[in-house]
Image (spheres, rainbow, N blue to C red):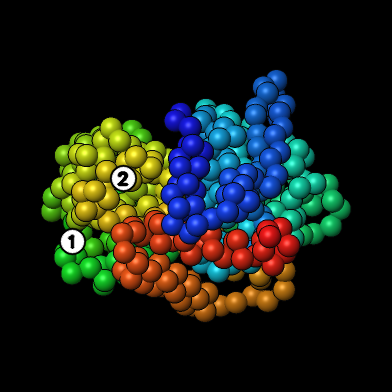
């Protein structure tokens, strides 16, 4: 895998120039606060695992745990950095963290996954807690994973602490909105983008790369609101229908076949084809580094919404900018997940249970507020893209907190 963290450092250097950051400020932004690595022993296998808190100036660490063959310290550091910016951007009382275990969960039994989840908590429980670092689901982890982790944590510490982890089942003090939260937040941002763009409307064509929890949730919101999705892909392949993909049927197909490859009502396409389709909006909901210097020049979409973390590398970003393609960055577009995790955490800590309607309204308010902050800076400051605008806002907030704490001169 390409060294993702090199891309993070490149972006920090760009921001350094724009903000006239000192070397001390750059050092704080370039180094995680805490890196923890462990070897998990599960059924005779040894699995590498990480938990990294990147910055905690604004509050405890917050971030998901992923199970994937490509998990590495480099990847987890990058994800934790982006989460630090994301929580700062949307105004949550959190820092940024991330975790992962390197293995292929698709090849494993439910029993093995439970053992991995419990082993992860045994390795890192001292570093976790409602006021220290709060995990959540990510790639190949879900409500059941969080339930196992909560149970293991509470067995070890000897008391209940629901707020130590979010994304739990509703029966274990989870939040109803959490399952679709990232897709829901992305849908709110897409509507804002259309409202603020003269060349977009409800008939604009949309393609979605990635059809996991986030991509399928986004597709559901789009379909239910009458938007036109003409192509969707997952890692196995995809489907193209210029009259519009029935994503409601596609979700049913994916649930039963574990892929959308060979979906009957459309022309088969692969991931690379989807990235270069002539559509109005391209939604990236898969993995990191999907658009790079190699393929960025072939992207024809007018607008890109990043629902995945880091799906465009810095060189790809530069090419897209030069070609006039507007990118709505991940730290804004996919913030719905951590916002609803915050709602769950607040409910668990306080014992207050809020109505779903109220929480949905708050999600809309917080996503829209973040959009307007970023969009107004993007429009009013010369020669910056939306990602840079989002980074400027988030980094300014983090550095102000570090300064108030006495960690900066």
Q: Please indicate whether residue 286 sits to the left or right of residue 279 in the image.
A: right
Residue at the left extreme of this rendering: 243
What's the mark number on residue 318?
2
Q: Are marks 2 and 1 in contact (CB under 8 Å)?
A: no
Residue at 60% from the left image edge and 77% from the top image edge: 354
**x and y percentages locating residue 248 in the rendered image:** 30, 55
**x and y percentages locating residue 311 in the rendered image:** 39, 44
**x and y percentages locating residue 293 in the rendered image:** 30, 35
Assign the C terminus to one quadrant of the image: bottom right
Residue tagged by mark 1?
204
What's the mark number on residue 138?
none
Q: Which of pointers 2 and 1 lies earlier in the amino acid sequence?
A: 1
Q: Circle 1 sits in a helix, a strand or a loop, which is it?
A: loop
Q: Residues within 10 Å of mark 2 (few under 14, many from 20)?
A: some
**Residue 215 in sight from this viewpoint:** no
Quarter of the rendering containing residue 396? bottom right
Residue at 44% from the left image edge and 30% from the top image edge: 2
Q: Circle 2 sits in a helix, a strand or a loop, which is it?
A: helix
**Camera-side residue of 168 and 317:** 317
Compared to residue 398, the image places residue 98 above or below, namely: above
**Camera-side residue of 93 and 7:** 7
Residue at 27% from the left image edge and 50% from the top image edge: 321
């Amino acid at each position: 895998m390409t060294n993702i963290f090199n891309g993070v450092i490149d972006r920090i250097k760009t921001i350094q120039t724009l903000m006239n950051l000192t070397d001390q400020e750059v050092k704080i932004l370039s180094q995680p606060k805490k890196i923890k690595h462990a070897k998990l022993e599960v059924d005779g296998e040894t699995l590498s695992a990480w938990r990294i808190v990147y910055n905690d100036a604004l509050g405890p660490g917050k971030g998901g745990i992923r199970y994937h063959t490509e998990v590495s310290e480099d990847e987890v550091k990058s994800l934790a950095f982006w989460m630090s910016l994301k929580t700062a951007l949307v105004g949550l009382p959190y820092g940024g963290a991330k975790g992962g275990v390197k293995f292929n969960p698709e090849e494993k039994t439910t029993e093995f996954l439970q053992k991995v989840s419990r082993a992860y908590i045994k390795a890192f429980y001292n570093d976790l807690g409602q006021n220290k670092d709060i995990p959540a689901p990510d790639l190949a982890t879900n409500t059941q994973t969080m339930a196992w982790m909560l149970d293991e944590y509470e067995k070890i510490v000897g008391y209940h602490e629901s707020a130590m982890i979010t994304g739990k089942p509703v029966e274990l003090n989870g939040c109803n909105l959490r399952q679709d939260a990232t897709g829901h937040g992305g849908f709110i941002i897409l509507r804002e983008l259309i409202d603020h763009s003269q060349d977009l409307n409800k008939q604009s064509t949309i393609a979605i790369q990635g059809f996991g929890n986030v991509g399928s949730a986004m597709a559901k919101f789009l379909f239910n609101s009458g938007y036109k999705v003409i192509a969707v892909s997952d890692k196995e392949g995809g489907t193209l229908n210029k009259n519009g993909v029935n994503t409601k049927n596609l979700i049913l197909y994916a649930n039963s076949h574990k892929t959308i490859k060979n979906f009957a009502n459309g022309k088969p396409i692969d991931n690379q084809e989807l990235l270069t389709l002539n559509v109005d909006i391209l939604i990236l909901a898969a993995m990191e580094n999907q658009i790079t210097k190699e393929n960025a020049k072939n992207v024809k979409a007018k607008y890109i919404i990043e629902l995945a973390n880091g799906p465009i590398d810095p060189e790809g970003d530069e090419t897209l900018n030069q070609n006039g393609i507007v990118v709505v960055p991940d730290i804004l577009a996919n913030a719905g997940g951590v916002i609803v995790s915050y709602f769950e955490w607040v409910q668990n800590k306080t014992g207050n249970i809020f109505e779903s309607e109220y929480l949905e309204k708050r999600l809309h308010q917080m996503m829209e507020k973040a959009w307007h902050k970023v969009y107004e800076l993007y429009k009013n400051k010369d020669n910056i893209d939306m990602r840079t605008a989002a980074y400027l806002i988030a980094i300014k907030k983090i550095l102000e907190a570090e300064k108030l704490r006495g960690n900066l001169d």
